[in-house]
Image (tube, helix red, strand yellow):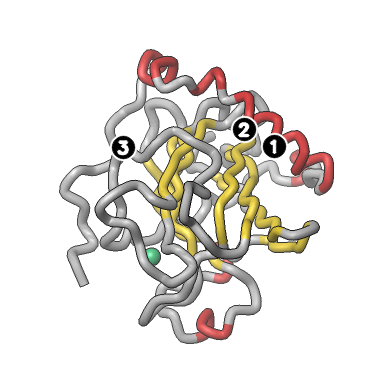
Amino acid sequence: MMSERNPMPFGRKVSRRQMLATGSFAAGGLLIAGDKLHAQQPLAATSACDDHEPTVAETEGPYFKPHSPHRADLRTAGIGGRPVELSGLVLTRSCRPVHRALVDLWHADDKGVYDNKGFGLRGHVFTDADGRYAFHTILPGLYPGRTRHYHIKAQAPGEAVLTTQFYFPNEERNRNDGLFRRELVMRVGTAQDFLQARFDIVLDLA
Ligand SMILES: [Fe+2]
């Protein structure tokens, strides 16, 4: 295994100007997708979480690459595998939605292989005014030593980066993966011909 440390940290501050340059205010497809998802699966009332625990941090792993493409749909040409809509909210500990939070997703393909040469199955989005993010991607395959997972980084503008991983429920390997955390299991349901995975990220902000 390669080092867990990344020589080009993701943690550079993302300025408002940089976000404008990457088109975060024009992510119409993301907003539409998010609206559709949330119409099907209403969000829990946020008033119930006045003092939420921040989402648990996890190792970045050896396959993170900075400067992923700004895109909500990671299913580029030639990508197989079961479609997944991964969505959720980015919230503060007091359950305030974080607008323009950066959410970066990278994961293995359906055969358990990462694209380390290009940016296959890598991308980032920015949350909308309600703190929502959404990706269209696939179910990642398994690779030796790990259970099924997504890698995630999330960052409110100008704040520290949270690096973590999301897990799938009812996976046999969850029991034997030393990195697996129950708190990081997504809610996963089936919608038509794709899986619908939900995870609300809580950043360590007031
Ligand atoms: Fe991984």
For marks 3 and 1, give the CA distance.
23 Å
Residue with the mark numbered 3: 67
Q: Earlier in the sequence, mark 3 or mark 1?
A: 1
The C terminus is located in which quarter?
Answer: top right
Residue 106 place in picture, x, y as percent: 42, 53
Task: Give the numbered dot on residue 34.
Answer: 1
* Residue type, mark 1 in image: Gly
Residue 34 place in picture, x, y as percent: 69, 37
- Answer with left or right where residue 149 lies relative to residue 66: right
Residue with the mark numbered 2: 30
Name the one closer to the observer, 40 or 14: 40
* Residue type, mark 3 in image: His
* Residue type, mark 2 in image: Leu
The residue shown at (83%, 46%) is 40
Q: On the image, which quarter does residue 111 sit in?
A: bottom left
- Answer with left or right where residue 54 lies relative to residue 29: left
Vertical arrangement, residue 12 with respect to residue 201, above or below: above
The residue shown at (48%, 56%) is 79
The N terminus is located in which quarter?
Answer: bottom left
**Labels in figure, total:** 3
Residue 3 place in picture, x, y as percent: 18, 64
Classify mark 1: residues with Cα within 10 Å, few (<14), some (14-19) or many (20+): many
Marks 1,2: beta carbons within 8 A: yes
